[in-house]
Image: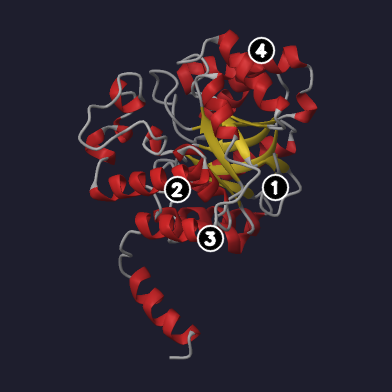
């Protein structure tokens, strides 16, 4: 396992982060603790959770493991705030009230006095961004949070947040967590360039596209019953959302790569992702030790250049305006045309 700096920060995180959404859902506490042990034994140090994962059970299970393991100072813990945690009008969002309540609840569940990376789980259109950022900066100043991050922000929202922090002397955003995979490459259009230019860490969530890049699915065949799509776990991963000519082309190319290289499709997909400029870590989610072992097999080697090119081509999507316009004429300028 290699370690990468979280953008320009001084924080070193493992290139594979263990997402804990399965803790308490698909993995009971005993299984989850065994997964955490296996992950850290392999050199992993970066756990990602959220206050809403399984109504807080994910944080509780992770907190119990942290206490039992007795090595909190060696572990990087990331959590998130935004989504609804109750029925009240203030039980969601990025208001000062909800954030201050949520951080204390998360700290109790995690059985720790600080969170290493505290992330805004989604942009909140109902709360002034200045209120949110000042509140989060206060948490850093008070020692409850070490670094700040965002997730599910547009490029302009991310840049505006950083500009506000810089102008007001607040602790600034250090990382972005965004969906990114061979089936979701729009992140490359502007979010990744912003991360590179601004010195932000980029954490890729759903790097296997909800299991679609794991090798489980075959065109024309029913979804396996034990798969996420088969169970209907998440709307975004249902066939109506993921299935397309592009998806099957990528899956076929991954299959060819894995057969030639002696790797699994999931390993090839994760390795492709970690090779992309600006990516700090891939956030994986697993339910079993076998799944974890397979995903950890994505590091320590590199896809041959020809297979990177083939996967790039198979997963390419047409650029919309103005990206298409800029790409066309920038390329001509760089080539001397």
Quadrant that contains the N terminus: top right
The residue drawn where x is 35% and y is 24% is 227
| Disc number placed over residue 64 in the picture, else none | 4
The residue indicated by pointer 1 is: 4
Which circle, 4 or 1, is nearer the viewer? 1
Instruction: Measure how far apart labels 4 and 2 are at the Cα level.
Output: 40 Å
Q: Are marks 4 and 2 in contact (CB under 8 Å)?
A: no
Quadrant that contains the C terminus: bottom left
Query: Which element type, helix, strand or loop, lies under badge 2?
Result: helix
Residue found at the far bottom of this picture:
337
Which circle, 4 or 3, is nearer the viewer? 3
Query: Which element type, helix, strand or loop, lies under badge 4?
Result: helix
Sequence-wise first label, 1 or 3: 1
| Disc number placed over residue 305 in the picture, else none | 3
Residue 156 screen position, x and y as percent: 45, 58
Which circle, 2 or 1, is nearer the viewer? 2
The colour scheme used here is secondary structure
Asked if residue 107 is positioned above or below residue 122 in the image, the reply reads above
Q: Label 3 neighbourhood size at 10 Å, few (<14), some (14-19), many (20+)? A: few
Query: Which one is nearer the viewer's eye here, 244 or 4?
Result: 244
Sequence-wise first label, 3 or 2: 2
Asked if residue 56 is positioned above or below residue 218 in the image, the reply reads above
Q: Label 1 neighbourhood size at 10 Å, few (<14), some (14-19), many (20+)? A: some
Residue 49 screen position, x and y as percent: 56, 27
Q: Are marks 4 and 1 in contact (CB under 8 Å)?
A: no
Q: Is residue 291 visible?
A: yes
Sequence-wise first label, 4 or 3: 4
Asked if residue 317 is positioned above or below residue 99 in the image, the reply reads below
The residue drawn where x is 49% and y is 36% is 94
Instruction: Measure how far apart labels 2 and 1 are at the Cα level.
Output: 26 Å
């Amino acid at each position: 396992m290699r370690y990468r700096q979280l953008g320009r920060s001084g924080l070193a995180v493992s290139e594979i982060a263990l997402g804990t959404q399965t803790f308490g859902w698909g993995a009971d506490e005993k299984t989850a603790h065994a997964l955490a042990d296996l992950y850290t034994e392999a050199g992993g140090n970066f756990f990602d959770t959220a206050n809403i994962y399984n109504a807080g059970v994910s944080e509780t299970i992770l907190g119990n493991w942290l206490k039992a393991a007795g090595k909190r100072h060696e572990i990087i813990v990331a959590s998130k705030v935004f989504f609804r945690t109750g029925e009240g009008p203030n039980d969601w969002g990025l208001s000062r009230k909800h954030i201050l309540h949520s951080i204390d609840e998360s700290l109790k569940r995690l059985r720790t006095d600080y969170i290493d990376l505290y992330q805004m789980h989604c942009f909140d259109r109902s709360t002034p961004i200045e209120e949110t950022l000042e509140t989060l900066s206060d948490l850093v100043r008070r020692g409850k949070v070490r670094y700040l991050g965002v997730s599910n922000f547009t490029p302009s929202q991310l840049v505006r947040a950083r500009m506000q922090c810089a102008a007001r002397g607040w602790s600034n955003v250090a990382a972005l967590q965004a969906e990114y995979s061979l089936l979701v490459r729009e992140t490359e259009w502007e979010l990744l360039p912003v991360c590179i230019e601004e010195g932000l860490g980029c954490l890729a969530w759903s790097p296997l596209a909800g299991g679609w890049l794991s090798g489980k699915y075959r065109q024309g065949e029913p979804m396996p019953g034990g798969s996420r799509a088969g169970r209907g776990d998440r709307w975004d991963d249902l066939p109506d959302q993921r299935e397309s000519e592009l998806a099957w082309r990528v899956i076929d190319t991954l299959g060819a790569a894995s057969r030639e290289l002696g790797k699994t499709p999931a390993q090839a997909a994760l390795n492709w992702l970690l090779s992309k400029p600006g990516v700090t870590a891939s956030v994986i989610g697993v339910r079993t030790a076998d799944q974890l072992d397979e995903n950890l097999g994505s590091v320590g080697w590199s896809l041959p250049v020809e297979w990177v090119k083939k996967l790039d081509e198979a997963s390419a999507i047409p650029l919309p305006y103005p990206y298409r316009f800029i790409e066309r004429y920038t390329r001509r300028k760089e080539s001397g045309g």
